[in-house]
Image: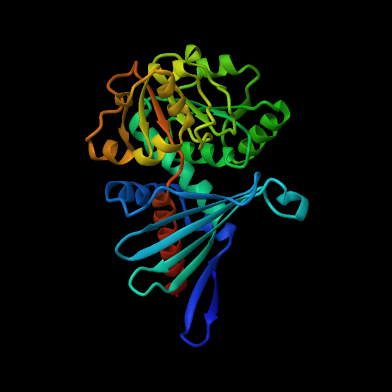
């Protein structure tokens, strides 16, 4: 159970702390997807995230969002030298407050919250964009987010029968495949990326690439691309050909069109125009944006992450904890 800590004896404000393991335990995939769907259908106020350069290498990101009942903010630090001092290159904390009073209600591990909501958002989008008969998932990337992406897609799509894992480090791909196998997921490391892409129904990319990793010429008709790794204009995971061939939907238009190098670079080069981005996930879920039209369409979901997802996930985590605390 979450630890309750009295932060202010004078006014009695009590804040629930949820460390990483409790955030994961509170955010089962299907309830989290339902909460995210509700948030995308009736989005809270969530400005585009703000980034401050702390130094030439270090950055602070602030991601606020609020609705009628809650106010939340995620603080993310990117400090490449942090591991030298016992920290993590990317670290995050989420503070959830009461909207009516402004009083703090919960402090959550930001990394756990982020990997959960990112993976669940992609799984939610794939439910609308990928073919209903998709059986093979390819995971491109072996970093901290990768296993969570696989878990979310598998939980949301029982038809998946095989998971391929590819990484620049073949040993890392093998270790991730073995981890997933121990969890009962039929995973195997892929040797050649072009062959794996050609076999996959869903290609999920979670890398820090600044040059294309997946090429449009490798994609067979009907493939769904799920891109979550590149979150700045200078980063990209696929080439322009992949974007040109695809029906493109993003998580939130304002953020994606400001930050997603996978789209901004083809736009700047004239390979696509603005109309090629059909809409965002909220429009797709409301039926105002047409994603897949037939089994041969290549679809592409580009996510850069958004504060509305953090708020929805944090509220759900606190609610489920409070339910458990109140149950005899």
Is any part of residue 255 visible from this angle? Answer: yes
Q: Residue furthest left?
A: 288
Numbered marks: total: 0
The colour scheme used here is rainbow
Q: Residue at x 33, y 38 (%)?
A: 281
Where residue 246 sits in the image (x, y, percent)? Answer: 38, 20
Where residue 135 sits in the image (x, y, percent)? Answer: 45, 25
Q: Residue furthest right?
A: 84
Where residue 92 sits in the image (x, y, percent)? Answer: 57, 55
Where on the picture, by quarter, is residue 1?
bottom right
Is any part of residue 1 visible from this angle? Answer: no
325 is higher (above) or lower (below) than 55? below
Along the line of sight, the residue nearer the viewer: 182 or 36: 36
113 is higher (above) or lower (below) than 241? below
Q: Which residue is drawn at 52% across and 34% down?
A: 230
Where residue 147 sits in the image (x, y, percent)? Answer: 58, 39
Along the line of sight, the residue nearer the viewer: 63 or 4: 63
Q: Which residue lies furthest to the top in this view?
A: 217
Locate the C terminus by quadrant.
bottom left
Q: Residue at x 45, y 15 (%)?
A: 241
271 is higher (above) or lower (below) than 44? above
Q: Which residue is drawn at 61% across and 37% down?
A: 180
Position of 279 compared to 115: left or right? left
Position of 113 compared to 78: left or right? left
């Amino acid at each position: 159970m979450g630890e309750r800590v009295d932060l202010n004896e004078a006014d009695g404000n009590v804040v629930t702390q949820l460390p990483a393991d409790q955030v994961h335990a509170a955010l089962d995939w299907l309830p989290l997807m339902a909460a995210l769907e509700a948030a995308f259908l009736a989005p809270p106020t969530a400005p585009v995230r703000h980034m401050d350069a702390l130094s030439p290498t270090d950055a602070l990101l602030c991601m606020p969002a609020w609705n009628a009942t809650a106010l939340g903010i995620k603080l993310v630090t990117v400090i490449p030298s942090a591991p030298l001092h016992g920290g993590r290159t990317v670290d995050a904390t989420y503070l959830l407050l009461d909207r009516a009073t402004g009083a703090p209600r919960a402090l959550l591990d930001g990394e756990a919250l982020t990997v959960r909501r990112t993976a669940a958002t992609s799984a939610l989008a794939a439910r609308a964009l990928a073919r209903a008969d998709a059986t093979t998932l390819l995971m491109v990337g072996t970093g901290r987010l990768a296993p969570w992406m696989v878990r979310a897609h598998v939980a949301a799509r029982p038809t998946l029968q095989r998971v391929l894992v590819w990484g620049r480090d073949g040993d890392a791909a093998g270790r991730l495949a073995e981890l997933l196998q121990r969890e009962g997921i039929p995973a195997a490391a892929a040797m050649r990326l072009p062959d794996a892409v050609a076999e996959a129904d869903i290609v999920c990319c979670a890398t820090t690439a600044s040059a294309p990793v997946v090429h449009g010429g490798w994609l067979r008709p009907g493939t769904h691309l799920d891109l979550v790794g590149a979150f700045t204009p200078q980063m990209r995971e696929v080439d322009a050909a992949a974007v040109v061939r695809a029906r493109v939907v993003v998580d939130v238009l304002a953020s994606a069109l400001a930050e997603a190098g996978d789209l901004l670079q083809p736009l700047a080069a004239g390979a696509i125009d603005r109309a090629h981005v059909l809409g965002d996930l909220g429009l797709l879920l409301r039926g105002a944006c047409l994603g897949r039209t037939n089994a041969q369409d290549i679809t592409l979901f580009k996510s850069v992450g958004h504060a509305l997802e953090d708020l929805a996930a944090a509220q759900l985590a606190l609610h489920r904890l409070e339910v458990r605390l109140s149950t005899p």
